[in-house]
Amino acid sequence: MRITEAAQRLGTSPRMLRYREKLGLLPPRSGAAHRRYGEPELRAVALGLAIEQRYDIGPAELAFALRVLAEPQTRARVQELGERVGRLVPQPSRALDFEKQKALRLLRR
C-alpha cells in the first residue's frame, strides 16, 4: 500500500512515516523508487509507536537506542557515561579481563 493509506491505518501522518524511515525505524526498502508498505512495515511502525508511548520517548530517542544496541563502540561509550553519572553500576572486572588488559599493555611496549 502507499504511504497515505499506511499512515491512515497507523493513525499517523505520511510525514512522520518518512521521518521514521530516515531514522532507520523501518525495514530496509526493496530498492523501489517509492516505498510500498506491507505487513512487515506496518508491524514495525506499530511496535515502534507502542514502545514510544509505553516509555514516553520520541522516534529519535528510539532510533538512538537501536544504534546503541547495534554498535558496540557506541554502547561502550554510553555505558561509560552511565557509570560516570551514577545511573549504571560498573561491571565487576573478571580475572580474564585483567589478563587480557595485561597482555594488551605488554604488546604496546
Image: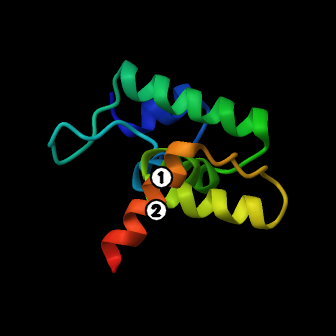
Single out the residue that lies furthest toward the right.
Answer: 86
Question: Which residue is nearer to you in this view: 68 or 72?
Answer: 72
Q: Residue at x 54, y 53 (%)?
A: 98
Left or right side of 62 for 17: left
Residue indicated by mark 1: 99
Q: Residue at x 64, y 56 (%)?
A: 79
Question: Which residue is nearer to you in this view: 37 or 107?
Answer: 107
Where does the image place residue 7, in percent across and percent down from the top left?
A: 50, 36
Residue indicated by mark 2: 102
Q: Amino acid at mark 2?
A: Lys
Q: Residue at x 43, y 54 (%)?
A: 100
Question: Which residue is nearer to you in this view: 61 or 89?
Answer: 89
Q: Residue at x 23, y 45 (%)?
A: 34
Q: Is residue 29 above or below residue 24?
A: above
Cα–Cα span, label 1 and label 2: 5 Å
Q: Looking at the rendering, in which quadrant would you find the C terminus?
A: bottom left
Left or right side of 8 for 37: left
Q: Looking at the rendering, in which quadrant would you find the N terminus?
A: top left
Q: Amino acid at mark 1?
A: Glu
